Amino acid sequence: MQIVSSIPEIRVAVRALRARNGAASGRSVGFVPTMGALHEGHRSLLQAARSRCEIVVASIFVNPTQFGPNEDFNRYPRTLEQDCRMLEAEGVDLVFTPTAEIMYPPGVSTFVEVAGVSDRLDGASRPGHFRGVATVVAKLFHIVQPDCAFFGQKDAAQVAVLRQMVRDLNLPVEIAICPIVREPDGLALSSRNGYLSVEERRQALSLSRALFAAEALAKQGEHRAETLLLAMRACLQQEPALRVDYVAVVDPDTLLPLEDAANGALLAVAAHVGGTRLIDNILLPPTR
Ligand code: PAF
């Protein structure tokens, strides 16, 4: 596994891997962009990339432009050695670990704004977050030039923003989405779970519990968003220490609220548990 930090190096390395064995049309490149602090959710993305593509490239970059001024950029876990062990074990060919100066040299003034969808759900609570995500992902796509890029369903709003960006900018990249990986008790895996105390981790379980309660209602035939929202809120209220950010039943592509989930819907929640903001979601399939 090769680890490189500069843009010229990664470009040369990807080109060489693509051309290896004299493949006439070039071998396919799967790309897993990450901010490090890798967990089993990331492992599932790496495995999906490995099974679908001939070459797997991962990036580790804690992107400053997607953090707000009072967010956790400084304390975000940085575990490069451990991350590299997982990347190596999953057969990653190439790892890109740029610095902030490489990605955002002085004078940089071009950003990617995906209007509308970027202001909904997490975008409403974290102004500028998706501008930072869209910009860094667009830059990484241009640098790595993958055929397919792999993201987790856990960040459902990010998925909607990036799909829209790829459509709008006609980027030649397929976006593949992998299911949420959960702990046995339901907690969705997140690099931020490490911030939780034992008591906060217990409280955090009410996010997935709320989603499962609404999903169970939907499976019984309930598709009115109002009823699903009530069920989720009732669950979350049982944990008064939680500060709920949003509870939503929305269209998974536009993130606009739905009144009826019968054609499929994204159930999404976000809440602050102590000083940690957590998100979770479930996709309801269409019932008609
Ligand atoms: O999902 C993440 O880890 C980040 O938002 C991403 C896509 C790597 C961009 O920094």
Image (tube, rainbow, N blue to C red):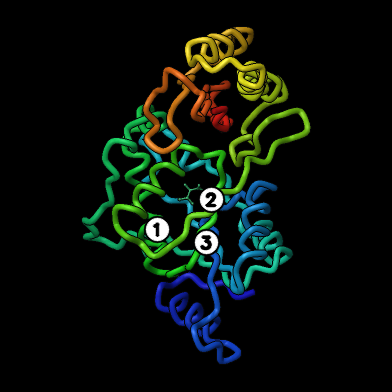
* Residue 34 percent location from the top left of the image: 53, 54
Picture quarter with the C terminus: top right
For the residues labelled 1 and 2, the Cα–Cα distance comes to: 22 Å
Relative placement, left or right, of 189 versus 263 is right
- Labels 3 and 1: the sequence-earlier one: 3
Residue ID for mark 1: 100
For the residues labelled 3 and 1, the Cα–Cα distance comes to: 13 Å
Residue depicted at 61% across the width and 74% down the height = 54
For the residues labelled 2 and 3, the Cα–Cα distance comes to: 12 Å
Residue type indicated by callout 1? Ala
Q: Are marks 3 and 1 in contact (CB under 8 Å)?
A: no
**The residue positioned farthest toward the front in the image shown:** 288
- Labels 2 and 3: the sequence-earlier one: 3
Residue depicted at 63% across the width and 16% down the height = 217
Residue depth check, mark 2 versus mark 3: number of the one nearer the observer: 2
Residue ID for mark 2: 151
Packing grade of label 2 (10 A; few <14, some 14-19, many >=20) is: many
Relative placement, left or right, of 237 versus 133 is right
Residue type indicated by callout 3? Ser
Tag shown at residue 59: 3
* Residue 1 percent location from the top left of the image: 64, 74
Tell me if I can see residue 185 in this picture: yes
| Circle 1: element type | helix
